[in-house]
Amino acid sequence: MSDPLDPHPPFLEAVALPGLLVAGVDEAGRGPLAGPVVAGAVILDPQRPIAGNRDSKTLSASRREQLAAEIKRHALAWAVGASSAAEIDTLNILQATLCAMARAVDALACRPDHVLVDGNRCPPLSCASTAVVKGDQRVPAISAASILAKVTRDRIMVEWDRSYPDYGFARHKGYPTRAHIRALSRHGPCAIHRRSFAPVRAAGRRPSTGPEGS
């Protein structure tokens, strides 16, 4: 039965794909101007449901952290994968996102029989897969994957903030806020900015001080 408090009744993996080991996959970080795009992959244990598991965008940062810890404890398997800013510039954001998703699935401790992917495109995988539009609202395993992806990426951007304190990455996580655009204009792009994104190109290519990497 669906959770009566949930306005988006979940697509039940157990009903749609009976007897199969199903992984959910989602990403975080397609829109930012800096940092990696990160994907999560989760195979939930039907015997250990996670109360409050929802699309990460509907949760507070503290609640996401709590749920991420529960997902890691209770899931049958979980993993994350990422594509760096340099890969995003080389491949484009869509292909880099699909690459991060494939890396997450490949890193799972057990091989799923089927993968449900949020959105309308699936990455190339060695197992069957299905794209589910608004899957982060409908599929519990995708919701869990969205939480892991978001928590992991936010932590990465907090770490980068220590190397590049002029940009405020710990606050906005690389998204194009007014403060971020002002910092870009003042300091130019740093090594983790996505130079193929228009606002970064417009800010010029004057490098900031700090360690190289993306």
Image (cartoon, grey):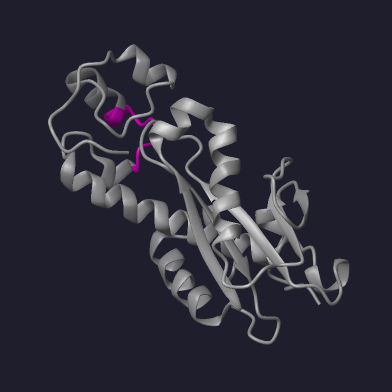
Residue 88 vs 145, above or below: the answer is above
Which quadrant of the figure has residue 194?
Answer: top left
Which residue, as the protein is rendered here, is positioned at the far bottom? 47
Q: Is residue 159 left or right of residue 151?
A: left
Q: How many marks?
A: 0
Q: Read off the magenta span.
A: 173-180
110 vs 35, nearest the viewer: 110
Residue 102 vs 193, above or below: the answer is below
At which x and y percent is residue 4?
A: 74, 72
At which x and y percent is residue 157?
A: 31, 47
Is 55 a magenta residue? Answer: no
At which x and y percent is residue 88?
A: 47, 32
Q: Is residue 191 left or right of residue 211?
A: right
Which quadrant of the figure has residue 190?
Answer: top left
Residue 114 vs 194, above or below: the answer is below
Residue 78 vs 193, above or below: the answer is below
Q: Is residue 42 left or right of residue 37?
A: right
* Residue in the image at 30% along x and 34% along y: 192
Which residue, as the protein is rendered here, is positioned at the far front? 126
